[in-house]
Image: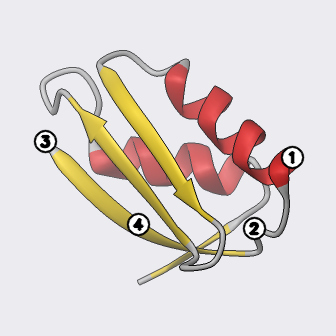
Amino acid sequence: MQSVIKVDGMACDHCVKAITNALKALPGIGSVVVDLKAGTVAVEYDSSQSKLDQIKSVIEEQGYDIIE
């Protein structure tokens, strides 16, 4: 499954690394693509192992805001 999440507050390579590393620690996460210009995080994941709500929570735990 793939989801594109709008995220506010990302500005630099540190943001990319923090989000990527945190998400990759979850089970079932495939690719993570952070687009600073677009303000999005595209995540491919196995929905039987990780849920979208979990993924959003991990991003928020890193200090970023999810834009619904």
Q: Which residue is mark 4?
A: 5
What amino acid is labelled 1 in the image?
His
Using the image as rendered, state which of residue 67 and residue 10 is in the foreground.
10
Q: Quadrant of the C terminus?
A: bottom left
Q: Disc 1, disc 3: CB below 8 Å?
A: no
Q: Left of 35 or right of it: where is 54?
A: left
Q: Disc 3, disc 4: CB below 8 Å?
A: no
**Circle 3 — which element?**
loop
What amino acid is labelled 4 in the image?
Ile
Residue 17 location (% of width, % of height): 75, 38
Using the image as rendered, state which of residue 14 and residue 47 is in the foreground.
14
What amino acid is labelled 3 in the image?
Met
Front position among marks 1 and 4: 1
For disc 4, the neighbor class at 10 Å (few under 14, some 14 to 19, many from 20) is some
Q: CA distance from mark 3 to mark 2?
A: 24 Å
Q: Which residue is mark 3?
A: 1
- 54 is higher (above) or lower (below) than 65: above
- At x 58%, y 43%, the residue is 58
